[in-house]
Amino acid sequence: MRRLANFSFSFAAAAAAYVWLLPPLWALITAGVLLVGMLVLLAFHTDPVRRVRIAALGAAVGLLWSWGYESLKLAPLRGLCGEGRTVTAQVCSVPVQTQYGGCSAVGTLNGGRIVLYLNCPAQELSLGDAVTVKADVIDVSHGSGDDNNLYYQSNDISLLALQRGALTVEKAEKTPLSCYPVLLAARLKDRIGLVFPGDTAGFAKAILTGDRSGLSFATRNAFSVTGISHIVAVSGMHVSLLIGILMTLCRQRRKLAAAVSIPVMLFFAAMLGFSASVTRAVIMNCVLLIAPLVHRENDAPTSLGLALLLLLAVNPWAIANVSLQLSFACMAGIFLLAPRIYNRLMKWINEDELRERHAIVYRVYHGAAVTVSTSVAATVFTAPLVASVFGAVSLISPLTNLLLMAVLSATFTLVFFAAIAALLYAPVGAAIAWVASWPIRYVLWLTGLLAKIPFAAVYTDSAYIVAWLLTAYLMLFVFFLYRQERYKVRLLLASLLVTLVGAVFFSMHSFSGITLQVFNVGQGQCIFLQNDENAVMIDCGGDEDEFNGEQAARSLLARGLTSVDALILTHFDTDHTCGALQFLSRVRVRQLIVPDLPDSSGNRETILRYAAQADIPVLLVRQDLMLNFGGGTLYLFAPEDPNVRNASLSALMSDEEYDILITGDMDETAERMLVATKDLPDLEVLIAGHHGAKRSTCEELLCKTVPDTVIISVGENTYGHPAQEVLDRIAAIGAAVFRTDLDGTITITR
């Protein structure tokens, strides 16, 4: 059986090499060399040589299969690309309304899949409809953007189509059989929304169908920080729970369980679009169910390898799918490391005596040992990937899983029965949903609480944390080589803790003196200002809403800062405030300082209401203020006329001979008033007003302050920011210019 595992993992390694490294010609040459080497090795009959032969065959087949997939499937699809092309595709996903008034849907054509961005409302399309549209067709099978992101093709999507002309929809006479799982998933979501209360419906949809659209950003982020994002990403855990329900209903009868469970699992996977983690779990559980019926033992590495082989046979580019990578890394950790951790935990007790005298205590301890060993093993194998992709590693994950795993199992079961009952008779579904809502509320409350614990997660924004992670894995390697058992585990844990404390300490003291950080938040503004004693955030917005606030919070948390003296908002425009609530929920803010400006967007009311609920003191700036800022001073200049367009509070930080001015969205009129009424010094740094807009950063302000450096916080936009006139005015005074759209996050230290 292990021969299949050897072949499968070699096939996967070859697919990875083809996707990321080898051009097609070199892939064919390498495959030929491997096949020749395999033939040469046929003359030798030792076990090691046999393993090498199988590995060489697997790698050669993997390269040839990947080349054939690209040549026979992807190449014809790429031939459809270009501007103003007419394509016809059959809708195979539920259309989704976009924020621009149109809709998007996945379609099938020529054996491949395409994402259609259309100008019609979503309700005009149904599953199975044939769509003919004149569109710009884009090849995303090689990736999209400058970073060669393989997200689309790793999810078996090769093309994007942006409507540019006529659209014709041929309505399907009936829903195709292949679309029934997708249709059922949509109906389950609707029924869940009907029978569950508003505060739990989003979680119920997510845990059963993987649809996280009903969860707030703060909730999703809390799951990420506490290391349980997998519970709302429908993964192998959910398939195992589903199997547990079916096995119970079948009263553990193996043949009946296999006959019922296998088709149900396949249908469940089809409902979720055969996502990598779910498909992996389905294949492995099918092997687990079938093996006893054919008098074979289930071999975990073999079933894991078979799952990987089948996934990559369907789409070799799936190797680039992060979900697949995490799923298989998690299972590898559980197979290889979890038994060792479990055995170690069980050695801490007298198992036989505890089982006989305190059966309940033994069961609780045994369950906790299983949960902790599984969680720690999975974390060890997935942490490097999570850190590189998501920039964070949850330290509190084992505790979260220990406190929640049993609850989550019960919750999934209740949500499953509530959804099924709701399809048949809504009142019964509502009754079960009412019961299920209480453990859901517990999960939401606990994860929110645990996510607020300092250092619940560590972030790779800090080079010291990255160094700690590398050191931690080096220590783990030494741990497995070190044969002396006495004090071995204690020494490892102590070393991990001491080095982590050291990394946090150095992160906290990595910036001394004055630090100015202008975050790259796209078309918006988010600025951090710190000296040896004080720290403030000035504005907290961008073009990705709450994510910008989380980005700022993680940057501070990565350097060990769990609180700031103030969050100062220059005004209430969304591009300066959209991340404020998320930032306030993640970092302790001692005071919220805002100008007393009118606001028609509702942002002012929302932010002030949140501050009141969180018991954060609020200072409304109606006149100029002078605040102590360590060894310097922070001047806050109130808007001269609150009713003018783009009125903003402005901030001047002066520390000895170093001065920084931030003007928000001030236009030239307000800037001239600032110059005329305030004693502005020569500046070391000026943050350009209104993202470099034509009528900001005027000549009078520049000539008065003569900044050494001008920073423009700007992203992709249709306003023409930064205007060439502004760049010319800055160049005329000889200041250096830095832009977040070109230079990324900008950090200046003194």
Image (cartoon, rainbow, N blue to C red):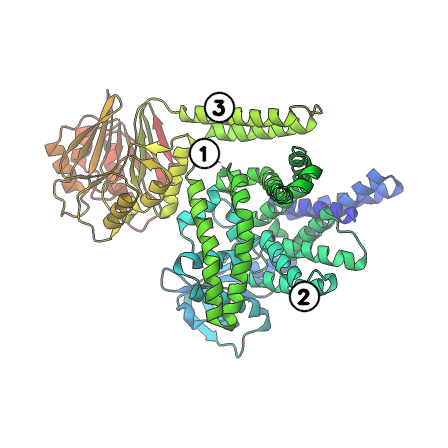
For the residue marked with disc 2, what is the amino acid?
Val
Of the image marks 1 and 3, the number of the one nearer the N terminus:
1
Of the image marks 2 and 1, the number of the one nearer the N terminus:
2
- Is 87 situated left or right of 680 in this image? right
Of the image marks 3 and 2, the number of the one nearer the N terminus:
2
Is residue 94 at least partly visible in the picture?
Answer: no
For the residue marked with disc 1, what is the amino acid?
Phe
Q: Quick check: 207 above or below 526?
A: below
In this orientation, which residue lies closer to the viewer: 409 or 598? 409
Residue 67 % position (x, y): 67, 52
- Is 619 situated left or right of 478 in this image? left
Circles 2 and 1, Cβ within 8 Å, touching? The answer is: no
Identify the mark at residue 502; answer none if there is no mark: 3
Q: Quadrant of residue 701?
A: top left
Identify the mark at residue 384; answer none if there is no mark: none
Identify the mark at residue 455; answer none if there is no mark: 1
